[in-house]
Amino acid sequence: MASATGIPQQPPIDPDTDGQVDDTEPLLGRPGDASQQDDAPIIKNLILGTGVLAEGAALLLVASVWASVFLNPVILFSIHPLAQSLGVLVLLQSILVLQPTHTAAQKQVGQKIHAGLNLLAFVTFLVGVVGIEVNKFRSNGPHFHSVHGYLGVITSIWILIQYLVGFTMFGVPALYGGEANAKKIWKYHRSSGYVLLLLMLATVTSAVETDYNKNVLGLKLWAMILISVIMVVGVYPRIKKQKLGF
């Protein structure tokens, strides 16, 4: 757009993208390939572009874990793999639904759904943690005797911090000195979330080396690695580098 003097005017700055004008270009692909269309329902964001791969992998994870659990006697410990695998599926939805948004209206709706799904995922993860802790106390089982246990603790702490920052930025921006300052932290929140996803998948994969899996579930290492890789391939190409501040 040009002014009356013929000098091009600068487009308005979107504080959500730190001044970047176009935030429709995914990490891999052309601008618009992984962006929500103006007239498209937001639910389509879940399978847009490579998102369908992530969805398929997450559903396969839940199906594999739940089938393995219910093909064996269900015990108190069973709550943990059931809840954690479901939590990963719910958490993935919160990522996929928000990634393709790029207009102010889309982002507003996407953020609300993102927050709601994250809250649901948090409750689901909490159920899984409570289940395994109650089981360990009842059976006097040891804590932190596996890589999975240590990764689980690190992941749980990271998730809690991620949720606290995310919910306060969205619901109580005054804690950060106002909405403008809160938006400046969004790119770090997003980056942290993508790293957290990798840590979470590593935690899931490490579970195959636990005694419970070796003696009961029988999930295969190669299968968990393959599922994790497909999920990453489904999520990461849709990342908008502009939203990360690049």
Image: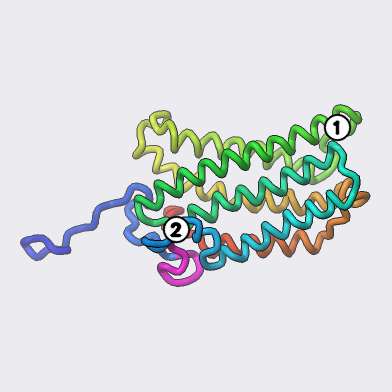
Q: Which mark is residue 69?
A: none
Q: What's the residue type where badge 2 is placed?
A: Pro
Q: Callout 1, which amino acid?
A: Lys
Q: Is residue 84 left or right of residue 240?
A: right
x and y percentages locating residue 236 in the rendered image: 56, 61
Q: CA distance from mark 2 to mark 1?
A: 45 Å
On the image, the x and y values in percent for residue 83 come to 73, 43
* Residue at the extreme right of the image, as rendered: 215
Q: Position of residue 40 (x, y in %)?
A: 42, 61
Coordinates of residue 214 in the picture (x, y in percent): 90, 52
Q: Can you say whether 177 is above or below 67 in the image?
A: above
Q: Residue at x 76, y 45 (%)?
A: 82
Direction from residue 3 to residue 94 in the image, left or right: right
Label 2: state its secondary structure. Answer: loop
Badge 2: how crowded within 10 Å, few (<14), some, or many (20+)?
Answer: few
Q: Main secondary structure of the magenta part?
A: loop
* Residue for point 55% across, 49% down: 94
Q: Is residue 93 left or right of residue 205?
A: left
Residue 98, above or below 121: below
Q: Residue at x 45, y 37 (%)?
A: 169
Is residue 229 found left or right of 187 in the rendered image? right
| Nearer-the-camera pick, 188 or 79 | 79
* Pointer 2 or 1: first along the chain: 2
Q: Report the residue marked by disc 2.
A: 41
Report if residue 104 lies within the magenta region: no
Color encoding of the figure: rainbow
Residue in the picture at 76% in, 59% down: 224
The residue segment tinted magenta is 26-36
Q: Which residue is mark 1?
A: 136
Quadrant for the N terminus in the image:
bottom left
In the depicted view, which residue is nearer to us: 80 or 10?
Answer: 80
Image quadrant assignment for residue 58 = bottom right
